[in-house]
Image (spheres, rainbow, N blue to C red):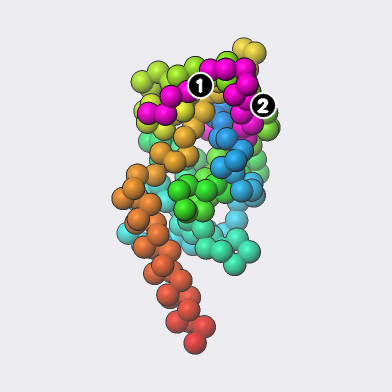
Amino acid sequence: MEEVRRTVDDERQLVVFRLYGEEFGIEITKVREIVKPREITKLPNVAEFVEGVTNLRGEVIPIIDLKKRFGLEATAMTDDSRIIIVDISENRVGLVVDDVTEVLRISGADIEPPPRTVAGLKAEYIQGIGKVGERLLILLDVEKILTTAEKIELKTELLQEDLVAAAGEE
């Protein structure tokens, strides 16, 4: 597990979002953009937490429901729901969240190592716990949201989608 450095110089900028009322943060360097929910095309034979794919300016992007990924009960998207487009390894992926609330800076001194579980999440997904005043932010490690096998599976599904699309254009 990546050791969390706790120095004042180690400031991080985070995109803060909510899932089931809990606040989470992702380092802004991993975030490409934040979009409103859009049409999602279902894919056969993929993991339950993969909602499908969407076309974002000509790029096919897999969409993951973070609630389902973390074993939480899925709920319908609302007007506040957003899709956070992130880079995970070499894959661009959309993460469905309840609401994106802010972008903030947090000092490394205010980040604690994660306990074994937080809000029902295993520590493997968590980089640390950020303290912002009285608030606690669960800092997600986006690289760990998908296993290596799941990354390969998504890449394979996307290649098949590209082949089907290309065949339809001929």
Residue 53 horizontal/vertical position (percent)? 49, 59
Residue that appears at 51% across and 53% down: 92
Residue drawn at x 63%, y 25% as measured from the top left: 11
In reply to whether residue 9 is colored magenta, the answer given is yes
Amino acid at circle 1: Arg
- Residue 15, image quadrant: top right
Residue 35 or 91: which is nearer the viewer? 91
Give the main secondary structure of the magenta stretch: loop
Instruction: Please state which amino acid type lies under the numbered disc 2.
Output: Arg
Residue 150 pos. (x, y %): 35, 50
59 lies above or below 34: below
Q: Which residue is mark 1?
A: 5
Q: Is 33 rendered above or below residue 22? A: below
- Residue shown at 37%/28% (left/top)? 1
Of 113 and 53, nearer the camera is 113
Residue 122: x and y, percent?
A: 37, 28
> Which structural element holds mark 1?
loop
Q: Is residue 162 left or right of residue 149?
A: right
Give the quarter of the image for residue 24.
Answer: top right
Q: Nearer the viewer, residue 117 or 10?
A: 10
Please say if the residues under marks 1 and 2 sit with CB atoms less than 8 Å apart. Answer: no
Numbered disc total = 2
Q: Report the residue marked by disc 2.
A: 105
- Compare residues 74 and 170 and report the one nearer the observer: 170
* Residue 137 part of the magenta-drawn span: no
The image shows residue 166, relative to residue 83, as above or below, that is below
Q: Secondary structure at mark 2?
A: strand
- Going from the N terminus, do you reach mark 1 or mark 2 first? 1
Highlighted range, magenta: 1-21
